[in-house]
Amino acid sequence: MVQTEVKRSNRRTAVVLWLIVAAFFFGVMVKYYLLAR
């Protein structure tokens, strides 16, 4: 029971980190796109 809770929280943390990285990468691409234009 505890292991499933830990696994679920770890997966949630991984998803949150992936969303942060994706948002940062998207922001950098938009900034470079606006600068290039």
Image: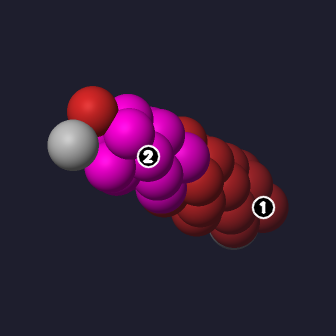
Give the crowd class for mark 1: few <14, some 14-19, many >=20 residues within 10 Å.
few
Rendered position, 9 above or below 33: below
Task: Please tell me which residue lies in front, 32 or 13.
Answer: 32
Q: Are marks 2 and 1 in contact (CB under 8 Å)?
A: no
Rendered position, 2 above or below 31: below
What secondary structure is marked by label 1?
Answer: helix
Tell me what residue is drawn at x 66 percent, y 55 percent: 13
Rendered position, 8 above or below 33: below
Instruction: Please name the amino acid that badge 1 sits on.
Output: Val
Q: Which residues are magenta?
A: 23-35
Q: Is residue 11 visible?
A: no
Q: Position of residue 37 (x, y in %)?
A: 21, 43
Q: Is residue 30 visible?
A: yes
Kindly identify which numbered label has been placed on residue 31. 2
Kindly identify which numbered label has been placed on residue 29. none
Q: Position of residue 19 (x, y in %)?
A: 48, 57
Residue underneath mark 1: 2
Q: Mark 2 or 1 closer to N-term?
A: 1
Q: Position of residue 1 (x, y in %)?
A: 69, 66
Q: Within the magenta stretch, is there residue 31?
A: yes
